[in-house]
Amino acid sequence: MIDPRVFTICQEYGIAIVDGRSYPGIRETRAVITLDRILATKGENHFRMVLTTVAETENNQGYIDKNLLWAVSDLVEAFAGIVEHQPSEWLECFDAAPVGELQVVSKRLRHQRFALVGMLAERVVRRFGPNAGQGDLFDERRAA
C-alpha cells in the first residue's frame, strides 16, 4: 500500500501521478512505488527536497521517472551540506544542467540510475567544488 502522503505531497508540488500504463507528460510521473520507497526510507524532509529539486527547476520536469527520482535522492543525500546551506544555488545548478539530455544518454546504459547520478554529480562538483571558478578549456559549457 502506498503511503497517502506521497499523493498529497506530490499534489503540493504540482506533480501528477498517472496510471502506470500511461506515458507521463510534463510534471507527471508513474513512478509511485519509487516515490513511496524514497519517502519510507529517507523521510519526509528528504522526500520534499527531492521533489523541490525536480519540480522547482526547469530542466527536470520533462520525464520524472524512477531513475531521475533515485538519482536526485542520491545527490540530495551526497551533497547534503550544499542542499542545506545553499539551497538556491543547488536549484540553480539543476536549472543549468541538461537533465533531459543526460537522461537520454543514461538510457543506453545498463545502470541508468547510477550513470545519471555520476553525470549530475559532475555538474554539482564543477559548480561547488574546489575548482568551481576555473573553466575547462575543452568544456562545451564554457563561454564562447
Image (spheres, rainbow, N blue to C red):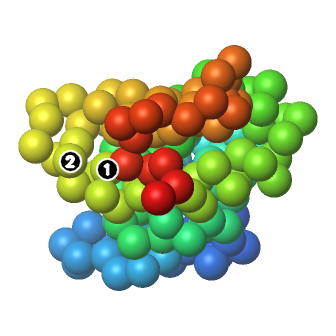
Picture coordinates of residue 51, whole percent (x, y): 63, 56
Asked whether residue 124 appears in the rendered view, the answer is yes
Residue at (67, 67) in percent of width and height: 56
Residue found at the very far right of the displayed protein: 85
Secondary-structure class at tag 2: helix
Q: Which residue, given by chain and number where applicable, does mark 1 sit on?
A: 102
Q: In the rendered view, tell whether residue 17 sits above or below residue 122.
A: below
Q: Which mark is residue 49?
A: none
Residue at (41, 56) in percent of width and height: 99
Q: In the rendered view, tell whether residue 102 sits above or below residue 75.
A: below
Q: Amino acid at mark 2?
A: Val
Picture coordinates of residue 143, whole percent (x, y): 52, 55
Residue found at the very far top of the displayed protein: 130
Secondary-structure class at tag 1: helix
Q: Which residue, given by chain and number where applicable, does mark 2 sit on?
A: 105
Residue at (10, 43) in percent of width and height: 108
Q: Amino acid at mark 1?
A: Leu
Residue closer to the observer: 60 or 14: 60
Q: Is residue 132 left or right of residue 19?
A: right
Residue closer to the observer: 138 or 39: 138
Kindly indicate whether the residue at mark 1 contacts the one at mark 2 (C-beta within 8 angstroms): yes
Picture coordinates of residue 43, whole percent (x, y): 70, 36
Q: Is residue 91 left or right of residue 94?
A: right
Residue 78's quadrant in the figure?
Answer: top right
Local packing at callout 1 (Cα closer than 10 Å; few below 14, some 14-19, many 20+) is some
Cα distance in 3D space between marks 2 and 1: 5 Å
Picture coordinates of residue 44, whole percent (x, y): 74, 44
- How many badges with numbers are in the image? 2
Q: In the rendered view, tell whether residue 140 sits above or below residue 133.
A: below
Asked whether residue 44 appears in the rendered view, the answer is no
